[in-house]
């Protein structure tokens, strides 16, 4: 399971930004060469968690994903990898592959949660080639990164939607604007290219 899957491409967190139109956070995954870009609109809590993992910030109290990783460590569970498996009706789906002794465990997970956990466990992140094809990912011919975004989630819409196109859920984007983003914005301001696996 640790071997490279020919049907998927290993990706890295290449950036975190705010969507200028909806003010929703976006995580952008990029391949090693920086040619393939996959933006995923996510929620503020997940963006905060991803940013804190990238910056290796120690919170006063553990965030949800810190708690998950602490539980894994205590129980002897290893995160083998995460895989974004599907893009259906503009919503991304993913799974976490865990190892517990000689047992393999596959859990359904939202991409943002899977990414946040992967960063804490140094697990590789893969995206199925079919997902990249469906998302109509273009190979950039310059080193300049495209604008990076994350799927919008309001408290009501923070269910399972992590979108390829935020216009699919305009109402959620409107609700998202009412969420307090100060803490996440402060973290974002502290991030720079050296914090990411992919250097812009």
Image (cartoon, grey):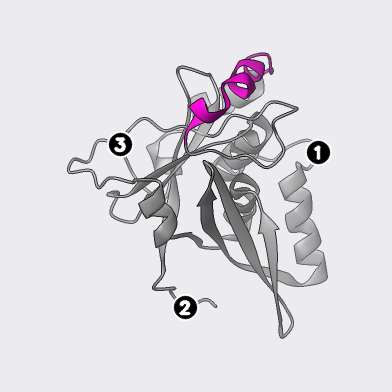
State yes or no: discs 3 and 1 in contact (Cβ < 8 Å). no
Q: Which residue is mark 2?
A: 3
Dominant secondary structure (helix, strand or loop) of the stretch shown in magenta: helix
Q: Looking at the image, which is closer to me, 170 or 30? A: 170
Q: Which residue is mark 3?
A: 145
Specify the quadrant that holds the C terminus. Answer: top left
Real-space CA distance between mark 3 and mark 1, rounded to the nearest whole angstrom? 34 Å
- Neighbourhood count class around disc 2 (C-alpha, 10 Å): few under 14, some 14–19, many 20 upward: few
Q: Residue at x 28, y 45 (%)?
A: 138
Q: Which residue is mark 1?
A: 61
Q: Earlier in the sequence, mark 3 or mark 1?
A: 1
Q: Is residue 102 left or right of residue 169?
A: right
Mark 1, secondary structure of its residue: loop
Mark 2, secondary structure of its residue: loop
Instruction: Examine the rendered structure and indicate whether residue 143 appears above or below residue 93.
Output: above
Please say whether residue 100 is visible from this viewpoint.
yes
Rendering coords of residue 90 (x, y %): 52, 41
Q: Looking at the image, which is closer to me, 47 or 177? A: 177
Residue bounds of the magenta highlight: 165-181
Q: Residue at x 74, y 27 (%)?
A: 155
Real-space CA distance between mark 1 and mark 2, rounded to the nearest whole angstrom? 35 Å
Rendering coords of residue 167 (x, y %): 49, 26
Please say whether residue 10 is visible from this viewpoint.
no
Real-space CA distance between mark 2 and mark 3, rounded to the nearest whole angstrom? 28 Å
- Neighbourhood count class around disc 1 (C-alpha, 10 Å): few under 14, some 14–19, many 20 upward: few
Mark 3, secondary structure of its residue: loop
Q: Residue furthest left?
A: 141
Rendering coords of residue 150 (x, y %): 52, 34
- Of tags 1 and 2, the one toward the viewer is 2
């Amino acid at each position: 399971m640790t071997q490279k899957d020919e049907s998927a491409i290993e990706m890295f967190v290449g950036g975190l930004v705010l969507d200028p139109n909806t003010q929703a956070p976006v995580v952008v995954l990029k391949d090693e060469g920086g040619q393939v870009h996959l933006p995923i609109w996510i929620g503020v809590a997940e963006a905060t968690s991803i940013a804190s993992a990238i910056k290796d910030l120690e919170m006063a109290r553990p965030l949800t994903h810190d708690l998950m990783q602490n539980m894994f460590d205590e129980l002897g569970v290893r995160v083998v990898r995460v895989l974004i498996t599907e893009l259906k009706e503009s919503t991304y789906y993913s799974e976490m592959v865990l190892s517990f002794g000689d047992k393999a465990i596959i859990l359904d997970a939202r991409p943002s949660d899977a990414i946040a956990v992967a960063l804490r466990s140094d697990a590789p992140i893969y995206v199925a080639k079919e997902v990249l094809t469906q998302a109509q990912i273009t190979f950039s011919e310059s080193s300049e990164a495209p604008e990076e975004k994350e799927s919008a989630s309001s408290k009501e819409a923070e269910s399972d939607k992590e979108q390829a196109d935020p216009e699919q859920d305009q109402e959620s984007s409107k609700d998202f604007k009412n969420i307090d983003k100060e803490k996440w914005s402060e973290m974002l301001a502290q991030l720079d290219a050296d914090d990411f696996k992919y250097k812009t």
